[in-house]
Amino acid sequence: MEMLSIGSSEPQTWFCHLELSALHLTSVLLDAEGRILEYQTSLPTPAEKMPTQIGRHFFTEVAPSTNHAEFRGRFEEGVRLQRLNVIFESIFKDQGYPAKTVVQMRKGPESDTYQLLFSYL
């Protein structure tokens, strides 16, 4: 798994350079503890299979396959340092089948918020 660090002074992301409508994106806004504040996805998901995610713990309740050092550990380190902006590949296994994703973790728009962007490949 390769990681690409983006300098904290560089607000643009690689998503800005791609055709967003062609990507299957999910955006999750978390608090410092990993609880979901906002959840948005462009993936077609039947309403009955899309439980409300707000207030749930991302790493233990929503996406337990991310509850390991390479994923959650990166998040917690970025929160601790108050500097989070990293892109890496991951296998997301919580949709019933393994899905290869590109993940960007970055500081959120407000203090003590953090955004995870998932692009499913």
Image (tube, grey):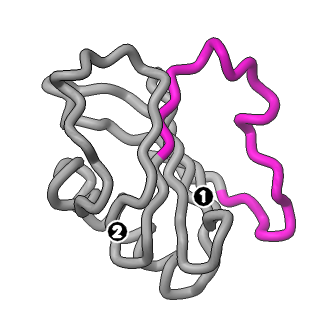
The amino acid marked with disc number 1 is Val
99 on left or right of 5 = left
Where does the image place residue 82, in percent across and percent down from the top left? 60, 83
Is residue 84 a member of the stretch shown in magenta? Answer: no
Q: Is residue 76 above or below residue 108?
A: below
Is residue 6 a member of the stretch shown in magenta? Answer: yes
Residue at 42% from the left image edge and 60% from the top image edge: 37
Where does the image place residue 17, in percent across and percent down from the top left? 81, 30
Residue 70, quarter of the rendered image: bottom left
| Number of other residues with Cα within 10 Å of mark 1, as a class: few under 14, some 14 to 19, many 20 or more | many
Residue at 41% from the left image edge and 76% from the top image edge: 76
Indicate the secondary structure of the residue bearing disc 2: loop
Q: Is residue 102 above or below residue 63?
A: above
Residue to which mark 2 is pinned: 34
10 on left or right of 112 = right
Stretch in magenta: 5-27
Q: Earlier in the sequence, mark 2 or mark 1?
A: 2
Residue to which mark 1 is pinned: 86
**Discs 2/1, front:** 2
